[in-house]
Image (spheres, rainbow, N blue to C red):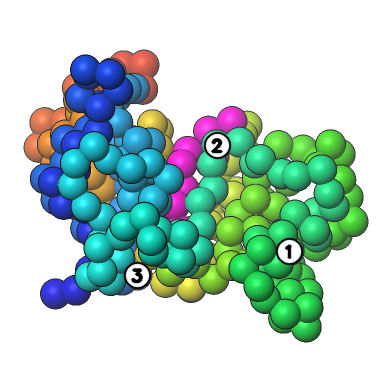
């Protein structure tokens, strides 16, 4: 079976300390996987390696079966999109922020406006198109950031704890909408979170990372049954697991 994205024999170090050691990790087309684990387990590092933002000391990442190297990394990276914990909006209007990635990827002017307007509307922020980032709430800014990513029609989407800084009602509302978007678009997605309660909104599948190594992969609802509650207790203040 050909995977859309695959990492093999990945080792990444900081100084003499090994922070990631993953023998194999792969994503199938249309699959959404959550990565969970305690603080410092390597969740965001694994995401950055898969998103081609960090180069491992050893190992290889393959995109649709083709090994990524220095010559083709930029071309493959342009087929992906990342949403970070911070919205990272530029000092430009909301419309221009969403359009920026399309311009950088060489889309024509006739193509840009419809795609931008589509995703501003889909994320409920079309009325903010001419507003500057400094006048947005945290939830609005993150909606714009997601619209910017989705407007690129990425083959793989990476979500690196994008809901963490939002207040509870805003976070739940956006999680529900994002779940609908991923189901509708069938975009292959890797989702990092430290909050296990976010997982069921987006996916039923999860990977547990601890000390830079994959400890478990399977249905998220099986984590508690298989004895991984201690990992969540470490990363979630001892609150345990509760699946609906």
Between discs 2 and 1, the one toward the N terminus = 2
Front residue of 176 and 82: 82
Q: Position of residue 46 (x, y in %)?
A: 31, 41
Q: Secondary structure at mark 1?
A: helix
Mark 1 is surrounded, within 10 Å at the Cα level, by few (under 14), some (14 to 19) or many (20 or more) other residues, namely many
**Judging from the image, what secondary structure is the residue with disc 3 in?**
loop
Identify the disc placed on residue 30. Answer: 3
Q: Residue furthest right?
A: 130
State left or right for residue 119 relative to residue 155: right
Residue 97 placement (x, y as % from top left): 75, 54
Residue under the image location 54 percent in, 48 percent down = 83
* Neighbour tally class for label 3: few under 14, some 14-19, many 20 plus, Cα within 10 Å: some
Quadrant the C terminus occupies:
top left
Location of the N terminus (image quadrant): bottom left
Q: In the image as oriented, which residue stretches furthest toward the front?
A: 71
* Residue situated in front as seen by the camera: 190 or 92: 92
Above or below for 215 versus 14: below
Please tell me the numbered disc located at residue 99: 1
Q: Which one is closest to the eye, mark 2 or mark 1? A: 1
Q: Nearer the viewer, residue 55 or 96?
A: 55
The residue positioned 39% from the left and 64% from the top of the image is 72
Q: Residue at x 75, y 44 (%)?
A: 90
Q: Earlier in the sequence, mark 1 or mark 3?
A: 3
At which x and y percent is residue 103? Answer: 71, 67
Q: CA distance from mark 1 to mark 3?
A: 25 Å
Query: Magenta stretch: residue 142 in it?
Result: no
Q: Which residue is mark 2?
A: 85
Is residue 164 located in the magenta-colored stretch of the structure?
Answer: yes
Bounds of the magenta span?
157-165
């Amino acid at each position: 079976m050909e995977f859309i994205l695959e990492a093999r024999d990945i080792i990444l170090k900081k100084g003499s300390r090994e922070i990631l050691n993953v023998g194999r990790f792969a994503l199938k087309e249309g699959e959404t996987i959550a990565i969970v684990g305690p603080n410092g387990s390597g969740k965001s590092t694994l995401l950055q390696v898969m998103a081609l933002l960090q180069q491992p000391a050893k190992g290889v990442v393959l995109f649709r079966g083709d090994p990524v190297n220095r010559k083709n990394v930029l071309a493959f990276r342009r087929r992906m999109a990342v949403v970070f914990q911070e919205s990272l909006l530029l000092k430009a209007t909301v419309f221009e922020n969403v359009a920026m990635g399309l311009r950088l990827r060489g889309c024509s002017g006739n193509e840009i406006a419809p795609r931008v307007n589509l995703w501003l509307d889909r994320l409920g922020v079309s009325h903010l198109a001419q507003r500057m980032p400094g006048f947005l709430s945290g939830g609005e800014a993150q909606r714009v950031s997601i619209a910017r990513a989705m407007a690129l029609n990425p083959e793989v989407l990476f979500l690196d704890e994008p809901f963490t800084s939002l207040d509870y009602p805003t976070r739940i509302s956006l999680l529900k909408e994002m779940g609908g978007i991923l189901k509708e678009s069938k975009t292959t997605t890797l989702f990092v979170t430290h909050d296990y309660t976010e997982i069921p909104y987006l996916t039923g599948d999860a990977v547990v990372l601890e000390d830079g190594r994959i400890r478990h992969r399977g249905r998220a609802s099986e984590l508690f049954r298989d004895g991984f509650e201690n990992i969540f207790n470490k990363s979630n203040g001892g609150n345990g697991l509760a699946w609906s």
